[in-house]
Amino acid sequence: MEINERILPYVERLESEWETHGKIIIGVDYDDTISPWKMNGFDFERVIKTLKIAKETGAYIVIFTACSSDRDNEILAYCASKGLEIDRINENPIDLQYGNTKKIYANIFIDDRAGILESLDILELAMYRIRGKKASNYNDSWK
């Protein structure tokens, strides 16, 4: 992966939050982000693969979508068909300890209308750095 130096402050912030809390919240749009709607040819599998690895690394996956709740079962079935375990749809996965608890909160958002490729780069780099540190700590415990 070629690293765009402009994303490094965002990578470092996400990595720091991940280390501090042990788990992050990833907000993910549905249509044209993990499931095709109008966009053809986009690599939805990259998003899904990245989210699966993030979940294993320590992340809540929350679908934040403008879709009506009538589509929740469709969203759940689609995610299950892709092997993507999600924690919530359109609600925060944890109780927020401050301010407006109805506000959508995430450490990072993956959305086709909000710099999806840059967000994926930030998430992937932070995630692999966290995974590397975990592996290093595991290897150190054997010494």
Image (cartoon, rainbow, N blue to C red):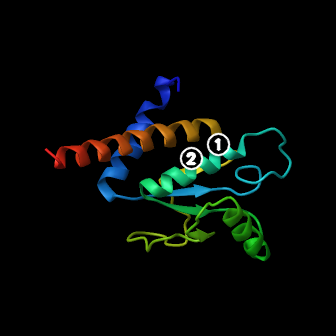
In the image, 91 versus 124, the foreground residue is: 124
**Visible residue check, residue 138:** yes
| Residue 43 x, y percent position in the rendering | 72, 40
- Give the structural element (helix, strand or loop) at label 2: helix
Count of picture labels: 2
Q: Is residue 21 above or below residue 132?
A: below
Residue placed under numbered mark 2 in the picture = 50
Query: Can you tell which mark lies on residue 76?
Result: none
Q: CA distance from mark 1 to mark 2?
A: 6 Å
Query: Can you tell which mark lies on residue 46?
Result: 1
Q: Is residue 114 above or below residue 30?
A: above
In the image, 59 versus 80, the foreground residue is: 80
Classify residue 64 as left or right of residue 140: right
- Give the structural element (helix, strand or loop) at label 1: helix
| Residue 76 x, y percent position in the rendering | 69, 70
Q: Do labels 1 and 2 touch, CB within 8 Å?
A: yes
| Amino acid found under the numbered disc labelled 1 | Arg
The furthest residue to the front: 142
Residue at 26% of width from left, 41% of height from top?
136
Q: Split into 4 quadrants, where in the image is the C terminus?
A: top left
| Amino acid found under the numbered disc labelled 2 | Thr
In the image, 125 versus 142, the foreground residue is: 142
Query: Crowding at label 1, few (<14), some or many (≥20) Cα neighbours within 10 Å?
Result: few
